[in-house]
Amino acid sequence: MANNSGGNCSIPSGSVSGTNFDTDGTCPGFTQVTSADLNLGSLQLNSPGTTATHALLAGSVAIDAATDCTLIDGTTPVTEDQRGVPRPQGPNCDVGAYEARSFTLTITGAGTGGGTVTNSGINCTVSSGSTSGDCSETVPEGTSIPLTATPDGSSVFAGWSGDPDCSDGQVIMDAGKTCTATFNDQSNPSSAVFAVRNDGTVSSDRAFFCGLAQNCFNTGLGADLAERIWVTEPVEPGDVVEIDPHHPGKYRKARGPFSPRVAGVIATSPGITLANDPGEQRGLLEHLEGYSLWTQVGPRPWVSSAVLLREAGHPTGSWLGLSALLDPKGERSEAWGGVAGILEAKRTRLALERLLSRPPGQPFLALMGRVWVKATAENGPIAPGDLLTTASKPGYVMRCSRLERCGGALVGKALTALREGEGLIEALVLR
């Protein structure tokens, strides 16, 4: 008996048998203990019960304290607790309505590196997926076990797996569980299941490889996620492509307006790339040439350009940034970035000297994010925010003026404008 208002017991006379505990001295014949000694959980539904009980937590004096498992007659056996859990779970029955079960937490290892997993009852060494030392602990039901994973000097801790409850390293023991600690060797990323090097390269079981440009993440050179694809005809960055119905698994330039086969846009300079050949490191940026990119900005008839390019005659591999504002007559009013003599301005269209040349190997299909895409104003001027669909010209997009016609043929949403003619616009891929 414990923690009752007005006293735990009111027993004027009678006899007491068996093992009983009391926390306030009001129960004659009971063994007086403290609330900390009993260590009871809150009154709640404890699995598998359908009525509320107080769990006996780790270290409770009531665990295994009953000298027999019988009713008050001393002969009729008690085979289960109030929840239906079989009794006893240990050498003796527990006192009260709750029979505490014990569950074992087991630690296993994974990965190419090493480290240790510890808590008050576990001190487990992990090395290349193998474990040694004290790698298990048996505790009463309901015990919370915090796990600490510490990698060795050449490894990184990649996370927990196993039982879903292991994911945050805090395990509630309501059943037997196994938690797997993954440590990966940083000194040899090519063999790692998952590794992050200090130069920014992320490797994950060789299925993901970052390598388009130096410091390929967050360079400002690309803002999309792309993967390499197979095509059945020459394509170039900015082309809209569709699934080739005659060659399963391959792509071609999109053909015709509102094409239901449309797949996306060939990326210009992806920020993150998938399905790379690890030996192909150079990426798209090595194939950039001089460009002029024009878009209409705001309500005023001014044109803005912002693009990375290589100045004609400049040493190979030296890249410069360019931004400019142009007046309606096509004259450069302001420019900076150290590039001059390349602009060929047009008032109402995006003027290009030429499109980006195709990179070696398979082209990149943008899966999400911002890309430059070939566009035509054949279905009306394109404004920022307009939905885009395939146009009659192969590889181009146009404005989607009627959503019911574009439902299965949407490419993305325009981020920049095209008032007339043809050109490049920036778009947000929505495929």
Image (cartoon, rainbow, N blue to C red):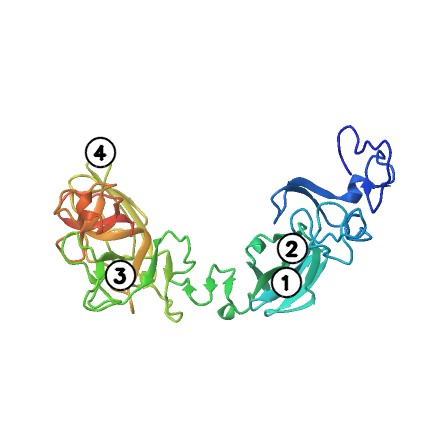
First reached walking from the N terminus: tag 2 or tag 3 = 2
Front of the two marks 1 and 2: 1
Name the residue beneath numbered marker 3: 313
Residue carrying label 4: 299
Cα–Cα gap, marks 1 and 2: 10 Å
Does 99 sit left or right of 387 as displayed? Answer: right
Q: Earlier in the sequence, mark 1 or mark 2?
A: 1
Q: CA distance from mark 2 to mark 3?
A: 60 Å
Q: Nearer the viewer, mark 2 or mark 3?
A: 2
**N-terminal label among 4 and 2:** 2
Percent of width and height locating residue 41: 69, 43
Quadrant occupied by the N terminus? top right
Tag 1 secondary structure: strand
- Label 2 neighbour load within 10 Å: few <14, some 14-19, many 20+: many
The residue carrying mark 1 is 107
Amino acid type at image mark 3: Gly
Q: Amino acid at mark 4?
A: Pro
Q: Amino acid at mark 2?
A: Leu
Q: Badges 1 and 2: C-beta atoms under 8 Å apart?
A: yes
Answer few, some or many: residues within 10 Å of disc 3's Cα (few below 14, many 20 plus, some between 14 and 19).
few
Tell me the residue that label 2 is attached to.
147
Of the residues tagged 4 and 1, which is closer to the observer?
1
Q: Nearer the viewer, residue 357 or 56?
A: 56
* Image location (x, y in percent) of residue 359: 28, 65
Mark 2: which secondary structure? Answer: loop
The quadrant where residue 162 appears: bottom right
User: Do labels 3 and 4 touch, CB within 8 Å?
Assistant: no
